[in-house]
Amino acid sequence: MTGLETQINGLTGGDDSRFKSAAAGAFPILGEILSQIAQHKLEAALKDAIAKGAEPVNTLISAIESDATIAYERKRTAESAARVIAIDQYNREFAGGRNPDKLKAYGDAISAEEDRWEAFGTAQPTAGLESMKAANTALVVFARTPRPNIHDIGSLADAMSSFASTALRLSTSVQALLNKNQGGK
Amino acid sequence: MSRLDTIQMIGDLITKIDVMRGSLLPDDPHRHDLDDQRILLDDKQKRLSRVVFDDTTPAFTDGAAKLAVINGQIQDSFDELDSLLNTLQLIESFTNSVTTLLSAVAPFA
């Protein structure tokens, strides 16, 4: 934990101050919990996680969400340009040589770019991270309930199930995109 | 409107511009104008995504609100037939406003 914290603090760059700040809030709590687990005080460790973990963890997720969204937007701008490049090369061939084989190849390239664009649109990171925050909050609410009833258990299960399905959907979309980028099916 | 919202709004407009560019032949004069605006907006979006600043200051919120208004006018112009010139002028106005906004919140970006 100490090593990881040192690595985080050693990060450089203009836009990682928010991430460092969020991580700095979470690390002391995680360290304390791990220490208590090591001392076989599991119940106390869980209570500490309940009491102190919710806000820093959600802050950390928000910091990751912000960076991931910006990275996604810049990638979207690049992917959008690639669509136009594919159309341009088809139009140039159509206006010039009209070689059937080239036209077919360029047409296929347009189709591939459109498939990639569609897959990219479903791989937005925001939904998954928002779902993760909701699951974390639901876990804290549940753990703070002294004697959970069937309704409390159901609420927690719903939040976890929602997060799991969102994560699975996102993972499937990212995998599909990776396959398309590698020329697979 | 936050910094993230602004970056996304610029991205949405770039995507729309790309659709317009794809509908014009590469040697169309209007296409060159759209190419120029696209290059400028791409650069502005990159700068906004890299620079760290407070997006709750009046300098930013006022500038972002102005951008949202122009963006709305651009979206309306997309629905009008034969309004390419008008759309182009609005896009230029949007790009200039992004430049003004960047100068206000991050002069050295």
Image (cartoon, rainbow, N blue to C red):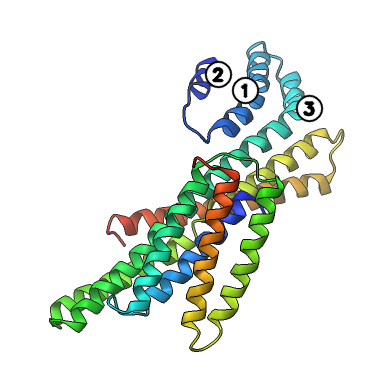
Specify the farthest residue to the bottom. Answer: B81
Whether residue A143 is visible to the viewer of this picture, yes or no, is yes
Q: Quadrant of residue B65?
A: bottom right
Q: Which numbered disc, 1 or 3, marks the residue closer to the eye?
A: 1
Residue A1 is tagged as 2
Q: What's under tag 1, amino acid-wise?
A: Phe
Residue at 15% x, 81% y: name it: A96
Left or right of B44? Residue A140 is right
Residue A21: x %, y % from top left: 62, 28
Residue nearer the viewer, A75 or B17: B17
Whether residue A165 is visible to the viewer of this picture, yes or no, is no
Around disc 1, counting alpha carbons within 10 Å, would you say few (fewer than 14), some (14 to 19), or many (20 or more)? some
Q: What's under tag 2, amino acid-wise?
A: Met
User: Which residue matches tag 1?
Assistant: A27
Q: Are marks 2 and 1 in contact (CB under 8 Å)?
A: yes
Mark 2 chain: A
Q: Secondary structure at mark 1?
A: helix
Query: In this rendering, do the residues under marks 1 and 3 share a single chain?
Result: yes
Q: For the N terminus of chain B, give its image quadrant.
A: bottom right
Q: Are marks 3 and 2 in contact (CB under 8 Å)?
A: no
User: Which residue matches tag 3?
Assistant: A51
Left or right of B27? Residue A33 is right
In the rendered view, tell whether residue A24 sits above or below residue A40: below
Mark 3 chain: A
Q: What's under tag 3, amino acid-wise?
A: Ala
Residue A135: x %, y % from top left: 68, 44
Number of marks: 3
